Image (spheres, helix red, strand yellow):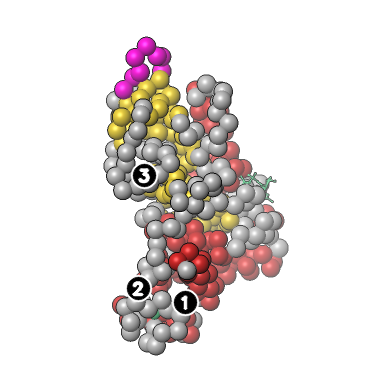
Amino acid sequence: MEALVYKSTGSWYVVKTGDGNIYKARVKGRFKMEGITSTNPVAVGDMVNIEMEAGEENTAVIDLIVDRKNYIIRQSPHNKNQHHIIASNLDQSILFATVKNPKTSTGFIDRFLVASEAYHVNAILVFNKADDFNKNDHKKYETLSNIYNSIGYKVLLISVVNKTGLHELAALLHNKTSLMSGHSGVGKSSFVNYVLPASKIKTQDVSGWSGKGLHTTTFAEMFDLEEGGKIIDTPGLREFALSDIDQYELAHYFPEMRRLLPQCQFNNCVHINEPGCAVKQALDDGIISISRYNGYINILNTMADKYN
Ligand code: GDP
Ligand code: ZN
């Protein structure tokens, strides 16, 4: 039977079949995935094949993972060399951000966007807490929204408290599988609770083997939207791993730089102080924003640390 993985607790998974039945499933024995060193073989969003477990009610064994369209990875908090697939088969990733209380840094936004580009996931930026903006905050938002819009990213301003912009955001989620991310405090849970008050409670009920002995981190959980579509919430997830990207590749994940790369004089240009660099020229011409270029340099520096 084919089923979709809705929740992972590390060793057990909650899966749902096409006819809407929910099962608790696990992987038996060792499950080797080609080319991926992952501490968990199965991810939320995976389409899997399950076989019912003999003599057990509502528990199943996962024996196959259907090829993934894409997936995102994070580094294990315990071991930098271990990776963990958070979610797969995503249509888009939504970053919740705020200009204050707490302020989301452009560095964080840029790392998120680079990761989304690298994992081939369409990214959308959502700024929350518009109700709390003064004139200066609106200016800050306009500046950021212009920077990211001009690169081609969709940017939305919402207030969960005042319920502004929420229909527009809900429309973007319609019939898509969306990963929700953001630093804690930006109002991501408030939005998630707004879009699925009923179904969230339902999922918790049905998976109601009530977490006995499951005091591990919940890595991610998928929820059905009433209007069609799914969201994947990732409690406690701060950042995706950028570990597979090398320094020569990085500029490819900045769309405004990517288009210029063929014009750099050297094809191993990292766009710092090489002669004939089209990226530096575009920066001087004001075509690439200083904030984005700094974001690029900051990521490049963390990579250099890793290599040296
Ligand atoms: P999360 O950590 O991103 O899941 O954030 P929460 O949803 O827990 O919200 C963090 C804090 O921000 C809470 O005190 C919320 O009441 C508050 N908050 C959420 N949305 C808004 C909003 O639209 N405007 C304002 N002013 N506060 C908000
Ligand atoms: Zn260059």
Q: Which residue is mark 2?
A: 259
Identify the residue at image location x=40%, y=14%. Answer: 56
Q: CA distance from mark 3 to mark 1?
A: 31 Å
Earlier along the polypeptide chain: callout 2 or callout 3?
Answer: 3
Label 3: how many Cα within 10 Å (few below 14, some 14–19, many 20+): many
Q: Nearer the viewer, residue 249 or 96?
A: 249
Q: Is residue 252 magenta?
A: no
Range shown magenta: 51-58
Number of numbered discs on residues: 3
Q: Residue 70's x, y, as percent? A: 35, 48
Label 1: how many Cα within 10 Å (few below 14, some 14–19, many 20+): some
- Give the main secondary structure of the magenta stretch: loop
Identify the residue at image location x=41%, y=14%. Answer: 57
Q: Looking at numbered disc 3 in the image, what kind of residue is underneath it?
A: Asn
Instruction: Find numbered disc 3 in the image and state the secondary structure of the residue it sits on.
Output: loop
Label 2: how many Cα within 10 Å (few below 14, some 14–19, many 20+): few
Q: Residue 144's x, y, as percent? A: 56, 67
Q: Is residue 84 above or below residue 158?
A: above
Q: Looking at numbered disc 1 in the image, what kind of residue is underneath it?
A: Ile
Earlier along the polypeptide chain: callout 3 or callout 1?
Answer: 3
Q: Residue 153's x, y, as percent? A: 45, 62
Q: CA distance from mark 2 to mark 3?
A: 27 Å
Identify the residue at image location x=52%, y=21%. Answer: 209
Q: Which residue is mark 3?
A: 89
Q: Which residue is mark 1?
A: 288
Q: Residue 307's x, y, as percent? A: 45, 66
Question: Does residue 104 appear in the picture of this structure?
Answer: yes
Instruction: Find numbered disc 2 in the image and state the secondary structure of the residue it sits on.
Output: loop
Residue 248 falls in image quadrant: bottom left
